Amino acid sequence: MDVKSRWWIVVASMAGLLVGNGPVMQFTVGTLLPPITHEFGWSRGLVSSAIVVGLWMTGIATPAMGRLVDRFGIRAVALPAIAVFSLATAAVAWAPASPAAFTALYALMGLGAAGQTPLIYAKAISARFDRERGLALGLAMAGVGLGASVVPQFAQKMIAAAGWRAAYAGLGALIFVLAFPAVAFFVGRPEGDGEVAARRAAAARMPGLTGFEALRTARFWSLAFSFFLVAGTTGGVISHLALLLGDRGVSARAATAMVGIAGAALIGGRLLAGFLLDRIHAPYVAAVFFLAPLAGIAVLLAAPGLEWAGIGIVLVGMGVGAEVDLIAFLLSRYLGMRAFGEIYGYFFSIFMVGAGLGPFAMGVSYDRTGSYKLMLVCFAFALALASLPMLRLGAYVYPAAREVCGEEEMAAAGPYVRRG
């Protein structure tokens, strides 16, 4: 694969991630939750619990998705999952006034969303980039930020025009239109039998740990602990951001626009993180981006004004913007590429447990105290705790190929290394 076609994979990944599990299932919560609670008379905690189930189903299914992708390739595994995610999202438009039915639909969404997590795209990019891996991941994952900015706006316009049920139908169609072609024609390009055999042989030669070996290392659990905390805190804040602003008297339209600011900051965070990862020791980059949302939460707590809230939202968004490409980069440098899909699946599963608990904790906090303040303070402490393990990771176990060998050795190392 030549350089130009490699970068087209990055562009397609950006388009696919615009309607990934995060933008569709998390960033639209604040927009969709008020009309749902109004129609059904449900509490915020009840609706949030259905979303938690969906996110957890994604987490449960992602490790299996990673193993299947390692074995059968991206296209064969991701395309059916994208179709399920699209249809299940659209099906919420016909949800009855039953918490069990609503939760079941979100569970099905979560299962399909396992094929629309960053795993699929990070796998394709990490296999084809080595020295420029950070930049490529940052550019691709900026699609999540673009989605975080655009998808809630899309849902808000659909709600204003035809109600929340039409918004779910529109989201389902949007997923299929953007993600399916991106994976079918670029990210998971068709492979012949010879290419499949060559890919499996190359993967077997790649340096790194197997999934079972990775689970037995302290580094795996150190990284998992940090990303669990970050996922819960940032996911909790972002998912309830529009509601938090609404409680301060901000209109629904303005609150949705402010969530768009978080999406723009997310894009900036991913691009900046990707640029820095190729130049600065990654754990230091991770620690800084974990502390950014802590500062953002402090601003949201201390300054109720809309202008200061915008600054806090930008800081939180920057932290959210660095999470997923940091997982992929740190995994590749400390645990290797041998079983990238499987190990990333384990990480993302843990990540999604945190991402599900955060919004649920925010909803319960509001239902019981009438405010988000207590949970925001807890989130700030969690972010400080998450940054500490990053500083103990040490030197890369699997540095970039050009850092440790010359061109002749790289040529002998196989196609995945040469593609850097």
Image: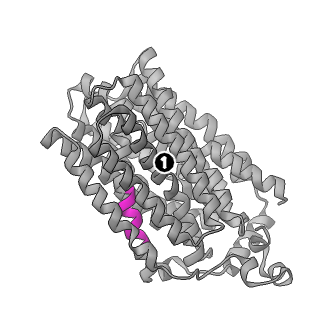
Give how far across and how far down residue 267 sits, in percent.
56, 46
231 relative position to 335: left or right: left
Seen from the viewer's position, the closer of residues 197 and 86 is: 86
Quadrant assignment, res 258: top left
Name the residue at 55% across, 77% down: 334
Name the residue at 44% across, 71% down: 223
Quadrant assignment, res 43: top left
Name the residue at 56% across, 37% down: 175
Give how far across and how far down residue 78 sits, in percent.
59, 52
Asked if 126 appears above or below 185 in the picture, the reply is below
Which residue lies most toward the left here?
368
Name the residue at 77% across, 56% down: 6
Asked if 174 appears above or below 378 in the picture, the reply is above
| Quarter of the figure that contains the N terminus | bottom right
Asked if 3 appears above or below 308 in the picture, the reply is below
Question: Which stretch appears magenta?
Answer: 223-231
Give how far across and how far down residue 287 sits, in percent.
45, 66
61 relative position to 331: left or right: left
344 relative position to 417: left or right: left
Whether residue 210 is visible to the viewer of this picture, yes or no, is yes
Tell me if residue 163 is in the magenta stretch: no
Secondary structure mostly taken by the magenta-highlighted segment of the chain: helix
- The amino acid type of the residue labelled 1 equals Ala
Q: How many marks?
A: 1
Which residue position holds label 1? 113
Say which element carries label 1.
helix
| Quarter of the figure that contains the C terminus | bottom right
Whether residue 350 is visible to the viewer of this picture, yes or no, is no
Seen from the viewer's position, the closer of residues 97 and 39 is: 39
Give how far across and how far down residue 336 sits, in percent.
60, 77
> Callout 1: 10 Å neighbours few (<14), some, many (20+)?
many
Asked if 321 appears above or below 46 in the picture, the reply is below
